[in-house]
Amino acid sequence: MSTLLNLEKGIVPLSRFRQSSKTYLKKMKASQEVLVLTQNGESAAVVLTPQSYQRLEYERALFMAIAQGEKDIAEGKTVSHKDLFDELLS
């Protein structure tokens, strides 16, 4: 299962997508691939399945949490294990 853009099949003119949208959506559901729709030769939209979008949002939230943790460490906003367990057990 890949959410990466397949450069051979993943870039589609909007007019072709309109003509065969049912077929493209069926293929996307099976493969979880992303489509880039073009208009006048330029990218105009990205189409992905709800599952791919949900996974993308989860990954974004995870990366944001990691970045916040790294920032907290750099700013000294940490708690020792002992202090944490003492607080949890009190």
Image (cartoon, helix red, strand yellow):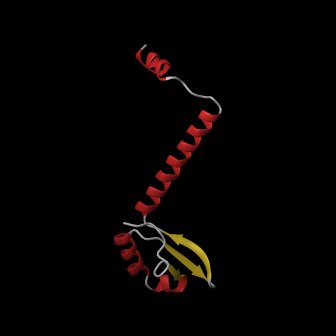
Q: Is residue 25 left or right of residue 71?
A: left
Q: Position of residue 68 (x, y in %)?
A: 58, 40
Quarter holding the C terminus is top left
The location of residue 21, given as percent across then percent down, is 44, 80
Identify the residue at horizontal 47%, vertical 17% (top origin).
Answer: 87
Relative placement, left or right, of 40 versus 58 is right
Quadrant of the image containing the N terminus: bottom left
Q: Residue 72 is drawn in which quadrant?
A: top right
- Residue located farthest toward the top when viewing the structure as drawn: 90
**As drawn, 55 above or below 15:** above
x%, y% of residue 2?
40, 67
Quarter of the rendering containing residue 52: bottom left
Give the left or right position of residue 4, taking residue 1 as reference: right
At horizontal 43% and vertical 84% (from top left) the residue drawn is 20
Work out which residue is located at the far left of the displayed protein and give it: 30
Q: Residue at x 58, y 80 (%)?
A: 38
Tag count in the figure?
A: 0
Residue 58 position within the rendered picture, expressed as x and y whole percent measured from the top left: 47, 51
